[in-house]
């Protein structure tokens, strides 16, 4: 049954999925997994006569390993293979083939001496055993957490992975301190009746395995494309002039966000032209110290020591000139004069898309009492205007209006007559 993923460039390739909903249900296809690699050498012919027999195989979530295709099997991205493991065998999905595998091995410093071999293409029995083991993982994780909680161990079972033949189960856990899980392994072996393997991972690796949506609205970088986790410290936030707020700077793993390092190099390059934030200016009105800086506008805010509530923004070129004057022993101009000199040449910017407007998302309804003045709509006439307009009207229209007014006056006088009131009361 074809999954239709087209990851290998040919939709006729069979990924081995045997379900009604295809590979999207059982997660066996190469395109359904995280951290996929685009093979940009797939359409390029190999100039070397010898074909590369190394293959990258992906298992659950982000776990990958390299194997050797000793039997020259016709493998492509998405093929389900049975590979060598200790003990027994495992089942995985081919995620990369060709010369690009050697580059990945060199990047991860994986030695070719430790490469295991591929047994065969997975048959129907291998796939059924593999899928049955995958279905038990969620319940096993819940039971394992209960056992660890009963033993009062300071650890968290993050994920569970069964081997393809069901002969071994690996428990991934996180902990802040060293854990003595000798008694825990005995409990697991007695309950699950299989070989137990415990592997400790970091909090970033836990977030990569579980996945999720970040505060930016996208999937987590660690679970989609980020393969290595570099250290992130608070200096990256300080260089980018971000507020040191742990709730905003921390990701779902509880650590600082990896994206703080993405634009750090650009900020560091821009900050090389800035004077140091500890710079103090000796002006005619007193000493001034730096409050903050704006990397994009290339400005620095200064305030006097005696009047720290009044801030003055200056260009970095002006700040450099003032610093050079202080080095010569001269006092610089007051901050007020420097700011006025800069404002003469500044042009007021207009916000065309109204990003700074707070109520740009609110709908402005026109009520009866809050009608906006329309330029095309005539203004209401006053009494004097109505009298003048009546005089300017034609004679026929004025006669008709006089007749209406006389009729209305007669009706009002008739209503005040007591006989008319009595007749209205008599009628039902």
Image (tube, grey):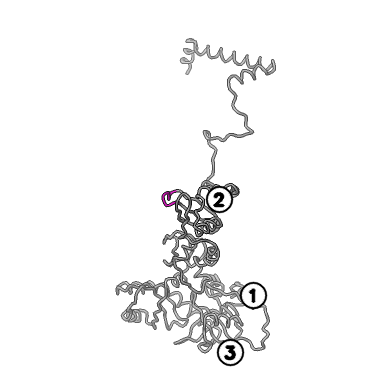
- x, y (%) of residue 236? 47, 65
Asked if the residue at tag 2 contacts the one at tag 3, i.e. Cβ–Cβ closer than 8 Å, the answer is no
Q: Which mark is residue 355?
A: 2
Q: Is 140 in front, or is 398?
A: 398
* Local secondary structure at mark 3: loop
In whole angstroms, how far apart are the C-alphas of marks 3 and 2?
62 Å
Q: Which residue is at a point 44% across and 79% down the rendered structure image?
A: 162
Q: Nearer the viewer, mark 2 or mark 1?
A: 2
Find disc 1 in the rendering and name its residue. 9
Q: Which residue is at a point 51% across and 61% down the rendered structure image?
A: 275
Q: Is 79 in front, or is 127?
A: 79
Asked if the residue at tag 1 contacts the one at tag 2, i.e. Cβ–Cβ closer than 8 Å, the answer is no
Is residue 119 toward the left or the right of residue 160 in the image?
right
Work out whether 124 lies above or below 245.
below
Find disc 3 in the rendering and name its residue. 71
Work out whether 352 lies above or below 208.
above
Quarter of the figure with residue 118: bottom right
Which span is picked out in magenta? 304-309
In whole angstroms, how far apart are the C-alphas of marks 1 and 3?
23 Å
Between discs 3 and 2, the one toward the N terminus: 3
Q: Main secondary structure of the magenta part?
A: loop
* Local secondary structure at mark 2: loop
* Local secondary structure at mark 1: loop
Q: Residues within 10 Å of mark 1 (few under 14, many from 20)?
A: few
């Amino acid at each position: 049954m074809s999954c239709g993923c087209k990851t290998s460039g040919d939709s006729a390739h069979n990924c081995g999925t045997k379900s009604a909903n295809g590979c999207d249900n059982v997660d066996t296809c190469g395109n359904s997994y995280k951290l996929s690699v685009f093979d940009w050498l797939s359409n390029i012919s190999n100039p070397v006569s010898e074909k590369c027999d190394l293959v990258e195989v992906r298992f659950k979530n982000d776990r990958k390993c390299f194997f050797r295709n000793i039997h020259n099997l016709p493998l492509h991205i998405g093929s389900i293979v049975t590979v060598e493991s200790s003990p027994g065998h495992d089942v995985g999905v081919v995620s990369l083939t060709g010369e690009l595998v050697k580059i990945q091995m060199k990047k991860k410093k994986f030695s070719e001496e430790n490469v295991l071999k591929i047994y065969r293409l997975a048959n129907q029995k291998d796939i059924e055993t593999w899928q049955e083991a995958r279905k038990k993982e969620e319940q096993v994780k819940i039971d394992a957490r209960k056992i660890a909680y009963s033993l009062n161990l300071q650890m968290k079972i993050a994920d569970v992975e069964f081997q393809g033949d069901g002969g071994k189960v690996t428990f991934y856990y996180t902990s802040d301190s060293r854990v003595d899980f000798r008694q825990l392994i005995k409990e697991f072996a007695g309950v699950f009746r299989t070989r137990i393997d415990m592997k400790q991972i970091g909090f970033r690796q836990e977030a990569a395995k579980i996945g999720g949506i970040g505060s930016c609205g996208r999937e987590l970088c660690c679970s989609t494309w980020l393969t290595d986790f570099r250290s992130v410290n608070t200096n990256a936030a300080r260089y980018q002039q971000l507020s040191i707020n742990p709730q905003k700077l921390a990701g779902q793993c509880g650590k600082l966000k990896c994206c703080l390092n993405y634009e750090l190099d650009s900020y560091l390059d821009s900050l090389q032209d800035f004077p140091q934030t500890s710079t103090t200016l000796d002006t005619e009105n007193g000493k001034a110290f730096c409050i903050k800086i704006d990397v994009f506008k290339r400005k620095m805010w200064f305030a006097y020591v005696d009047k720290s509530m009044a801030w003055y923004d200056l260009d970095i070129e002006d700040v450099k000139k003032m610093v050079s004057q202080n080095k010569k022993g001269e006092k610089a101009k007051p901050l007020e004069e420097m700011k006025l000199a800069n404002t003469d040449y500044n042009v007021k910017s207009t916000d065309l898309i109204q990003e700074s407007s707070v109520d740009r998302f609110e709908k402005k309804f026109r009520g009866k009492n809050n009608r906006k003045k329309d330029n095309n709509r005539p203004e209401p006439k006053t009494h004097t205007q109505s009298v003048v307009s009546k005089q300017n009207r034609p004679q026929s229209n004025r006669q008709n209006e006089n007749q209406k007014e006389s009729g209305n006056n007669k009706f009002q006088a008739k209503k005040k007559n007591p006989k008319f009131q009595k007749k209205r009361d008599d009628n039902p």
